Image (cartoon, grey):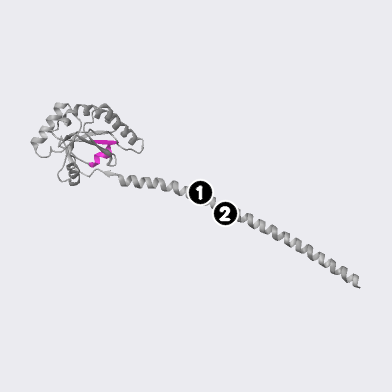
Amino acid sequence: IGNKAWKENTALSNEANKKYETTSSKMKMMKKTILIMTVLTMITSLSACGKSDSSSNATDQPASNQQEQAANTEAFPKFTAKDFDGNVVDDSLFAKNEATLLNFWFNGCSACVNEMPGLEKFNAKLRERGAELIGVNVQAGESQKTLDEAKDILSKQGATYRNIVIDDDSNDARAYISKIFSFPTTIIVDKNGNIIGKPILGNIDDEAKMEEILKVIDDLKSGKDTSSSITSEENPEMD
């Protein structure tokens, strides 16, 4: 009986050991599986975060550039005016051109007068690109005599490009003009009425400056970012 009981106990012990080893092996396998799944989850999460950040950066960067450009954009003030033929015009004229050059001058400015034949030829090149040069006489609105003198100057110089006189009640535009102290001064305005780059002081009728201006206009037409960096004269005529 003792031997039989011992054998039975030994068999039970061996069976328990087998069950323990099997259970232990399963537990080890489960731990490995859980560990692998955890690692895979972390890798997937990191990858997703990386993609999200990259996408966010790609989206935020242009938005930041657009905000910066918008902050640096200066619109030419709204105005009403009359051209030298008596026609009423306003700032909506900008929308009709790819770019508009406003050339500020006055009757007694010899540098302004001397560049007019060159501006006449340059305006023909501008028109080919859908742009236009417009003279803005800053004193012709003072009297009919001053206006007649301005017309006479244009006629003698063979200048047929459009010239205007901004109305006195266009306060913001007149305030802008009052800050111009060097003549001639030219600015480039895009079709949305925004001033491109800095004012160009002095004559623009030399080949180098005209080519620079045409390059800016070509960039505007093609939708590129533009920055007018046309060289200004060191000593333009002062009002």
User: Which region of the structure is painted magenta?
Assistant: 91-101
Which dot, 2 or 1, sits closer to the camera?
A: 2
In the image: residue 38, left or right of residue 229: right
SS at mark 1?
A: helix
Residue type beneath disc 1: Lys
Q: Residue at x 47, y 48 (%)?
A: 55
State which quarter of the image contains the N terminus: bottom right
Instruction: Count every numbered label the image shows and give the total.
Output: 2
Query: Residue 125 lies in what quarter of the image?
Result: top left
Identify residue type, mark 2.
Answer: Met
Q: Looking at the picture, how far across and down is residue 216, in whole percent? A: 31, 34
Compared across the picture, whether 155 is left or right of 226 comes to: left
Can you say whether 218 is above or below 33 in the image?
Answer: above
Residue position for label 1:
51
Which percent across, then down, holds residue 38? Answer: 60, 56
Magenta stretch holds residue 99: yes
Residue 87 seen anywhere in this rendered image of the structure: no
User: Residue at point 86% right, 69% down?
Assistant: 8
Q: In x, y percent, where is residue 107? A: 13, 33
Q: Marks 2/1: CA distance?
A: 14 Å
> What is the secondary structure assignment of the residue under circle 2?
helix
Check disc 2 and report the residue beneath it: 42
Please state the horizontal and vertical placement of residue 85, each as a whole percent of the image.
15, 34
